[in-house]
Image: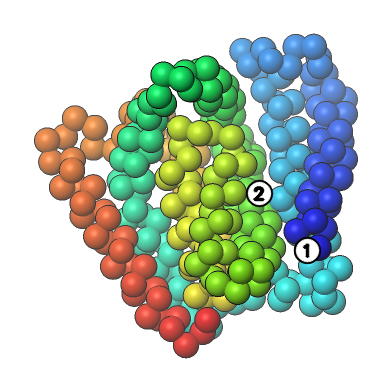
Amino acid sequence: MQLLLILLLCGVSLILFTLIGGVLAVVLYGMAVLNIENLSDPVVVEGLKLIQLCSAIGVFVVPPIVYGLIRSKKWGKQLGLKAPSKSMNYVLVILLMLASAPAVSWITAVNADMVLPDFLSGLEAWMRQQEDQAAELINAFLSIDGAGSLVYVMIIIAVVPAVGEELLFRGVIQKSFVQWFNNPHWGIWITAILFSALHMQFFGFFPRMLLGVVFGYVFYWSGSLWIPIVGHFINNGSVVLMSYLMPELMNDEILFEGNPYAYIYYLISILLSLGLILWFRRLNQNVS
């Protein structure tokens, strides 16, 4: 019933807020609905940014809050919006996101080169088409012009997804699955799989799933949703910041590409990440 409730809230809210975003895009920017696929038109891009912002708020932010209000008067506590018992958690999750970046980029590159069997060639072609369309839209959004544009794009790509997706996936769905299976590991992994699958970017499925697993465990161990929110923000926000400060690096598909010692760096990244995860678990061993 909990899952059915949140799905219903997400569906209704998504439709409502997407319609609101579409109307605002037409009124404020004069965006032509029939021209919505023309990403070379700045008016279309600005309109799509507004629609994306509204729809993300509609599907990720509003439903979990309404759900929390239905479940409890203390809706923030119900969703896990409480300070961690130890502020060191913030430091560790920041270090974890930085340390894991090379390993994540390598896993992303390996996932991107995935080839399906011949009998699934049609499915692979459709998946790559979806991936290309998503990449084209993201690149259009990351065309940043000035500090004001940077803040706006940061809100769209980093702030709202970090807060909203963690509210929905970790604050609601993961907690429901953990209770359902009476097993935190099942709940965390199933939620991470759904978290990655619903992004509809199949050639980045595994790194996104692993990030979902990390966010799931740090939330479960610390008991505070603010910890995965910070990690999620750093993960998304670093892409926005890099596209603004060092756009030439955005063409590199993988960190340390072409470096003869690249795999040593990836190994170090993995070992550091595992060490920080163990440290995080030990720090919070009396919390969860």
Q: Residue at x 34, y 72 (%)?
A: 278
Q: Amino acid at mark 1?
A: Gln
Judged from the image, the secondary structure of the residue bearing numbered disc 1 is: helix
Residue 83: percent from left, percent from top: 59, 77
Q: Residue at x 87, y 40 (%)?
A: 16
Residue 202: percent from left, percent from top: 50, 34
User: Which residue, as the protein is rendered here, is positioned at the far front?
Assistant: 119
| 65 to the left or right of 144 | right
Residue 167: percent from left, percent from top: 67, 60
Count up the numbered dots: 2
Q: Which color scheme did the rendering employ for the protein?
A: rainbow
* Image position of 163 with respect to 207: above or below: below
**Which residue lies under the disc numbered 1?**
2
Query: Tag 1: Cα neighbours inside 10 Å, few (<14), some, or many (≥20)?
Result: few
**Which residue lies under the disc numbered 2?**
160
* Image position of 163 with respect to 249: above or below: below
Judged from the image, the secondary structure of the residue bearing numbered disc 2 is: helix
Q: Write down the quadrant of residue 276 in the picture.
A: bottom left
